[in-house]
Amino acid sequence: MPINVKVLDRPIEDVSYLKATLKGMALTARHLVRPHKVTVQYPEEKTQLSPRWRGTHRMLTTETGKAKCVACGLCPTVCPANCIKLVPGEDEEGNRYPLIFEIDEFRCIFCGYCQEVCPEEAIFLMQDYSLTGTSREEMIFNKEKLLALGGVHNDRILKWKQKAKEAQEQE
């Protein structure tokens, strides 16, 4: 039994590879004459980030140089990626502080929950996207590294007072 093959006659302008090649070359020539600049020379030029961008973590200190964190344990509790390790401690006056505070930046999904839940406004996410490291150990930010990134934040943000004020206005 012979096989019947149906042969379609297509117009030459629809299947011409020469026409498609010429159209592609014309597009390339247009881009050479009128370039649309998309490339950013990264280390020298940085792109504008959205104000809502969440990048690397930082921990703030008080004016006396102590960490603002009171080791309440809310940030590791609320973290969906379980990337925050916190071991609380107390000084002789009864003030709580973190003995160990580590954030694994590889596991972090940069959701910002730790920043939102912090009652002391001690941890923030910076407007930085150049997070690099050559080993896994470099990407685990301990308390000292977080404090070095953060510094002192003199003008208080007072987000909880702001939220309480907004709640009173809504009532």
Image (cartoon, grey):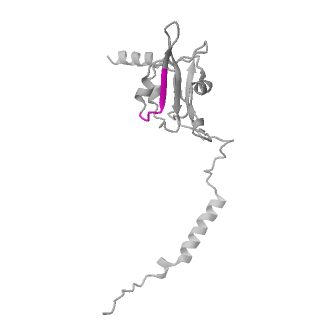
Dividing the image into 4 quarters, which one contains the N terminus? bottom left
x, y percent for residue 113 = 44, 29
Q: How many marks?
A: 0
The C terminus: image quadrant: top left
Residue 105 x/y as whole percent: 53, 36
* Residue 79 horizontal/vertical position (percent): 43, 31
Residue 82 is one of the magenta-drawn residues: yes
Left or right: residue 42 versus residue 113 is right
Magenta span covers which residues? Answer: 80-87
From the viewer's perspective, is residue 3 above or below residue 147? below
Q: Quadrant of residue 46?
A: top right
- Residue at horizontal 53 percent and vertical 28 percent from the top: 102
Residue 150 sits above or below residue 81 on the image: above
Kindly indicate the quadrant of the structure image that contains residue 168. top left
Q: Which is more toward the observer, 46 or 97?
A: 97
- Which residue is outermost to the top? 93
Asked whether 69 falls inside the magenta stretch, the response is no
The residue at the point 44 percent across, 19 percent down is 72
Residue that protrudes farthest toward the right in the picture: 44
Question: Residue 15 appears at what percent x and percent y?
Answer: 48, 78
Determine whether 87 is above or below 39 in the image.
above
